Amino acid sequence: MGEIVVKRAANLPMDEQPVEIVERKGKGHPDTICDSIMDRVSIELSKEYLKRYGRIFHHNIDKGLLAAGKAKVSFGGGEIVQPMLLVFGDRATFKVNDDEIPVGEIAVDSAKKWIRENLRFVDPEKHVKYQVEIKEGAAALVDIF
């Protein structure tokens, strides 16, 4: 194994530089879309838990994947040939006592609403397919919440 070399940076620390250049991913970037939709799912799921039970149950909804679709591009528009695929991942509480919480339905409805509000040329019914892979939370974690 090679040696680890630590050197002092030759430039000024960031907080002492007059300008910092950063990358900003726009609203339509897949990372932004996934993060924003997963945030919305978590918020809507929390609201549902609060409405039904007066408290928020264990969930960890922050994993999403947006797989590209295909479009036939033409001047002034185009046609969607294959829809995008939005995959929801992670964990949530699906059942309290004998009461089922529609986690998958909440996830898909939240995504469709976010898409309608933020991506004006994307039809959430036609241009996106949804795959819910959210699973039950681990018993050891669910019990402590």
Image (tube, helix red, strand yellow):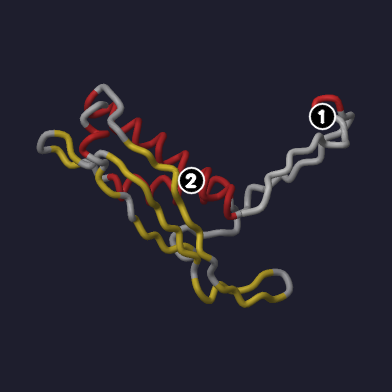
Instruction: Give the residue type that dot 2 points to.
Output: Ile
Up-down relation of residue 11 to residue 16 (above or below): below
Query: Most extreme residue toward the top, as rendered?
Result: 54
- Seen in the picture, residue 69 relative to 41 is either above or below; the reply is below
- The residues bearing labels 1 and 2 have C-alpha atoms spaced at a distance of 35 Å
- Horizontally, residue 41 falls left or right of residue 78, namely left
Residue at mark 2: 37
Q: Amino acid at mark 1?
A: Pro
Q: Quadrant of residue 86?
A: bottom left
Q: How many marks?
A: 2
Q: How packed is label 2: few (under 14 Cα within 10 Å), some, or many (20 or more)?
A: many
Question: At which x and y percent is residue 144?
Answer: 24, 26
User: Which quarter of the rendering shows the N terminus?
Assistant: bottom right
Tell me what residue is drawn at x 63 percent, y 47 percent. Answer: 27
Q: Tell me if residue 121 comes above or below residue 17 in the rendering.
A: below
Can you tell which quarter of the image residue 49 is in?
top left
